[in-house]
Image: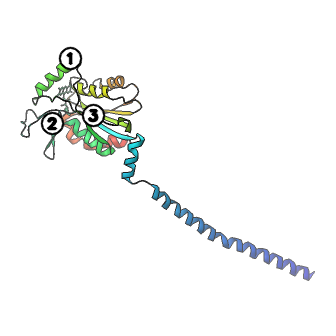
Amino acid sequence: MRRFAMILLTAVLALSLAACGGNASEPAETSAQNETTNAAPAAIVETIPSPETARAEAATDGSKTLVAYFSRVGNTDFPDDIDAVSSATLSRKDGELKGNAQLMAEWMAEEAGGDLFAIQTENTYPIDYRETTDVAKREQNANDRPALKTHIDGMADYSTVYVVFPNWWVDLPMAVYAFFDEYDLSGKTVYVSITHEGSGFSRTVSTIENLEPDASVIEGLSIRGSKVPKSEETVRQFVRDHQ
Ligand SMILES: Cc1cc2nc3c(=O)[nH]c(=O)nc-3n(C[C@H](O)[C@H](O)[C@H](O)COP(=O)(O)O)c2cc1C
């Protein structure tokens, strides 16, 4: 009986030691797993593309952002010493003359990391503000499409298009109609923003919906011209909110 008890005790001890051995090997396994776990992010980090690579890839997968704008500046041969009357509705940034739509578009492109595109006409508009309004009215009455001198190669690369323009005679400038006529924005998200002196969007958003029926057209920012120079943060925040 005593002998049997000794054998039983020895067997229990042996089993306990084996069990301990198993437990002792666990941390080693865990640390091996930790090494694997630690190694994984390093491998992932290696595969995360640099911003340059990301941009290059975006160029081919159709997910780039375009910011297209039309502005009086860029479509008028303003002299360097332009008088206060002609430039009353324009802004200066670092001494350089800027259109209001242009300023909004530049901030948007910077914030979105997108490409900036100026819609420019073959024929420039008069330096004088009133004369420009007369020309614009005649273009509108004639349902004219001014010839554009700037064009986009590879519109297919873009999935998001911000369009910024001034309200001209309670409508889009006719050059912006020409832009929408030239490009099929089907399947793209189009954010429409406007600058004005009281008319706001007018009916421009629904007009663009009709011009681009297969695009997702979204009403963006409407900013009075005189308020544009102080609206940088509003414009940037708008882009951040829609990314
Ligand atoms: C030809 C022309 C027509 C305009 N028509 C209107 C209008 O109908 N309603 C309005 O609120 N502002 C009108 N404006 C004012 C512009 O929309 C406003 O000054 C805008 O901020 C100018 O932007 P820009 O500097 O990018 O050209 C007109 C300006 C021009 C030159």
Q: Earlier in the sequence, mark 1 or mark 2?
A: 2
Residue occupied by mark 2:
90
Residue occupied by mark 1:
141
Image height check: is 176 above or below 115? above
Q: Earlier in the sequence, mark 3 or mark 2?
A: 2
Residue at x 25% of width, y 42% of height: 106
Residue 165 in the figure: left or right of residue 43: left
| The disc label shown at residue 108, or none | none
Residue occupied by mark 3:
151
Q: Position of residue 134 (x, y in %)?
A: 14, 22
Locate residue 82: give its quadrant.
top left
Q: Residue furthest top?
A: 142
Closer to the eye: label 3 or 1: 3
Q: Position of residue 105 (x, y in %)?
A: 26, 39
Q: Residues within 10 Å of mark 2 (few under 14, many from 20)?
A: many
- Circle 3: residue type: His
Closer to the eye: label 1 or 2: 1
- Circle 2: residue type: Leu
At numbered mark 2, what does the secondary structure look like: helix, strand or loop?
Answer: loop
Image height check: is 200 above or below 3? above
